[in-house]
Image (cartoon, helix red, strand yellow):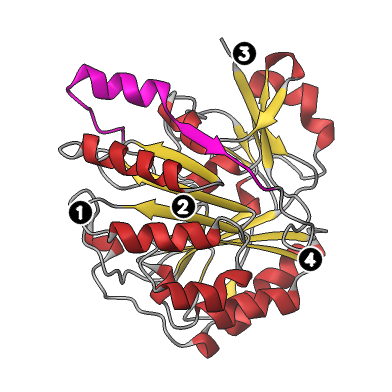
Amino acid sequence: MDKALIGIVPGKEKYVHIIWQVNDTCNYKCSYCNEGNWGGRYRNDNFSEFESILQKIVSHFKGQNYNNFKIFFSGGEPSLWKPLIPVIEFFRENTQNPRVAINTNLSRSLDWWKKNYHYFQDIIASFHIEFADKDRYLDNFKFLQYRIPYLVSRVLLHDERFKEVVEFAERLKSESDNYYVEYAPLMSELNSHSEDHYYEEEWKRKFIAEHQLDRQKEIDFCNTYRPKETYHEELREGGRKESLNSNRLVALGENRFKGWQCWVQECIYIHPNGDITMGSCRVTDSIGHLSTGEISIPKESVICPFERCNCGTDISVTKLHPEHLNDYIDSFSIPITSSEGSL
């Protein structure tokens, strides 16, 4: 049995997460999703309206000696967002080590991916059984498997079509040389703090307990494709570290950090309506808005007030269990606070 999780720590150097839920426009309307992801009220298509605030965000973190930036785009379906490539080009021009990630349903054409794949280092390819074109998804995945340092197929475990989802994952593994496949349980509601969906059939619960991540890597990518590593690690009792797997932590119920010290100021979250908070969990009050061009970023960590943390990026933010804080605090040059995050 794994020793208890006591922290999430940087693998090499500290870095900034910028999570941008770019809009609420999607070409899917999955039954387990909600209108906040496909309602189409906030398109945010004018890059010039938010370029200045992006510059303020970058300048702030450079002033705090952050050299590594990870930009994670979600939606909606972010590959359909008109300013996507201009925004990526902005970060490539204005930061030293940008790592660009996208959560996509992989529904764009193969020609689109051939033209744009080089912009991304991480691709989380969500598979949604109700709407996905299986052949297109597979064609895109097989093209990207040789070109993206971290490519994962995140298959959503639809309760009524559970076997069909698993069968598709097996097909993907049989037709691919390089893959990560995450089996993602549904949540009772699609938000940052909801409980997991309850699967009544025992064999489904057993499958989830035994399968979080399948992997196979036949090709080691050359350094041309691989930027400086900026991943976080799981810190366990006794000082043992291992690569962070947020999906596994959620499946095993290890995503409960209430009372932990969380360096949430490393994580900017931009919501579809333009509101900007620290983390998708909104542990702090709003710190700015795209429409005003104003932002005030805190410099201190917070004590987590929430029972659960469901967002993969929020999970990967640096955090320490209070009983082990003094053992590892010297590893971090960021001030801490004794106050609980505001709700």
Viewer-proximal residue, 149 or 32?
Answer: 149
Viewer-proximal residue, 320 or 211?
Answer: 211
Q: Disc 3 versus disc 2: distance between alpha carbons?
A: 28 Å
- Decide: marks 3, 2 in contact (CB < 8 A)? no
Residue drawn 45% across and 37% down? Answer: 309
The amino acid type of the residue labelled 1 equals: Glu
State which tag comes first along the sequence, 2 or 1.
1
Residue drawn 43% across and 42% down? Answer: 174
Query: Quick one: which residue is furthest to the front in this view?
Result: 175
The number of numbered discs placed on residues in the rendered structure image is: 4
The amino acid type of the residue labelled 3 equals: Lys
Q: Is residue 337 visible?
A: no
| Secondary structure at numbered mark 3 | loop
In the rendered structure, find residue 62 and report the number of the disc placed on it. Answer: 4
In the rendered structure, find residue 280 and report the number of the disc placed on it. Answer: 2
Callout 1 crowding tier (Cα within 10 Å): few <14, some 14–19, many ≥20:
few
Q: Which residue is mark 1?
A: 130
State which tag comes first along the sequence, 1 or 4.
4
| Secondary structure at numbered mark 4 | helix
Q: Which residue is mark 3?
A: 3
- Decide: marks 1, 3 in contact (CB < 8 A)? no
Viewer-proximal residue, 10 or 204?
Answer: 204
Residue drawn 44% across and 39% down? Answer: 182
State which tag comes first along the sequence, 1 or 3.
3
State which tag comes first along the sequence, 3 or 4.
3
Quadrant in the picture for residue 326: top right
